[in-house]
Image (tube, helix red, strand yellow):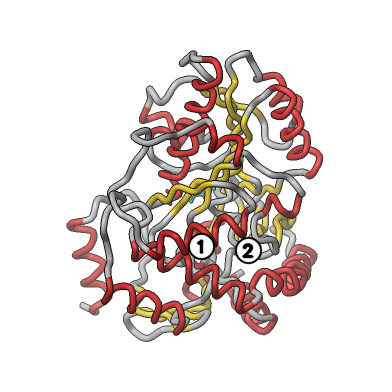
Amino acid sequence: MSISQQIMDQTEETVLHTYNRFPVVFDHGDGVYLYDADGKQYLDFGAGIAVFALGYGNRDYNNALKGQIDKLIHTSNLYYHRPLRDAAQQIISHTGMSKVFFTNSGAEAIEGAIKAARKYAYMADGSNDHEIIAMRHSFHGRTVGALSVTGNSHYQDPFKPLMGGVRFADFNDLDSVKAEVTEKTCAVIMETVQGEGGIYPSDPAFIKGVRELCDEKGILLILDEIQCGMGRTGNWFACDGYGVKPDIMTMAKALGCGVPVGAFVLNEKTAAQSLAAGDHGTTYGGNPFACAAVAKVFELFDEMDLVSHVRKTAPYLEKKLDELVEKYDFLACRRGMGFMQGLVVKDRPVGDIVKSALNNGLVILSAGSDVLRFVPPLVITESDIDEMTDRLEASF
Ligand SMILES: *Cc1c(COP(=O)(O)O)cnc(C)c1O
């Protein structure tokens, strides 16, 4: 039996089977490539689900983490430390928001955002039956609170009853959002660009309309930028591209480029009247190791001018994907922004294409039931894009 097979079998014996994993054992990465335990090379257009934006083996990033490991990995949130200040300053200066809370994951950032919105409304009127409007086909994570605002019955049904006070509207349909507003509405939560649901960018008129509606009714707007933030769309955060500012924003995925960390960020108005000492906490969240990663990620993004690189290179990816849509009848259309792109597949199981691509040395993802998802490391070049489309076409 091969070593890879042994590792896969022994993993399945012990790890709860909540994922149908692809039969590959990744061993190491270098730049935009991954290598499996047998030395086979894969071009990575998945980036560990939109996480590893810097590519693998960035020396400055790795050295920053190694340095922090030798100094101090963890202290708890009972004390101050330098990486916390540094990471927080970076987030505040890059978002224009006012205050940040660090979490260990995206789902936890959503949990915090929900609590912050409810506390804000509670401070305003003293009642505790507030409602949140969320979108159908959204994805906000798997913890019970985050699941409660995730508009997908497949994810929700086995785990009901979930958190109450959630109403669902249709994404990109402003009237359907207006129809769900009541006296009790405290927040609207949505992804700026829906990811897992199938790569749907907000229509500009929709997201601006939601912002206006929220302002008019005194409702907080929570934008989930966990997948679409951190430069992926060619702006620091996708909402920047629309000229829309949320009251609360969540981030994770590329925030630590592989070190597990998330955050929710509040604007000044929300921060002034929401979570206070004793209202929220976490043992690990924002520890020195995670914060050293976050601070270095922002520093490197700026040094490498990565956001402009995405903006400059994305039209080439779009052009190549559009050419595929022209050429193949089973590709219905392309949707997306920047390096967050989807190809809609008809008449073929999308999972088969993802598997076939893997055989051909290409990592891509699916989204929803019928979308091929491309969320590469942000450092890819035009020649990487050419190589991707070659390997993809070989997989068709
Ligand atoms: C991945 C994701 C989450 C959940 O993040 P986890 O770290 O998996 O908990 C939430 N929202 C969006 C938009 C995501 O893409």
Q: Quadrant of the N terminus?
A: bottom left
Is 331 situated left or right of 106 in this image? right
For badge 1, the amino acid type reads: Ala
Residue 265 x/y as whole percent: 53, 46
From the viewer's side, name the closer residue of 171 and 372: 171
The residue shown at (48%, 71%) is 296
Residue 203 x/y as whole percent: 77, 43
The residue shown at (49%, 48%) is 100
The mark found on residue 231 in the picture is 2
Measured in 3D between alpha carbons, the distance from the residue under mark 1 to the one under mark 2, in whole angstroms, is: 9 Å
Residue 25 x/y as whole percent: 33, 72
Is 283 situated left or right of 152 in this image? left
The image quarter in which residue 40 lies: bottom left
For badge 2, the amino acid type reads: Gly
The image quarter in which residue 20 lies: bottom left
Q: Tell which circle, 1 or 2, labels the residue nearer the N-terminal end.
A: 2
Residue matched to label 1: 254
Inspect this view and state whether residue 30 appears. Answer: yes
Tell me: residue 224, above or below residue 87.
Answer: above
Tell me: residue 14, above or below residue 150.
Answer: below
Q: Quadrant of the C terminus?
A: bottom right
Tell me: residue 140, above or below residue 125.
Answer: below
Inspect this view and state whether residue 356 appears. Answer: no
Q: Contact, CB < 8 Å: mark 1 with mark 2?
A: yes
CB at mark 2 closer than 8 A to ligand 1? no
SS category of the residue bearing label 1:
helix
SS category of the residue bearing label 2:
loop
Residue 347 x/y as whole percent: 64, 52
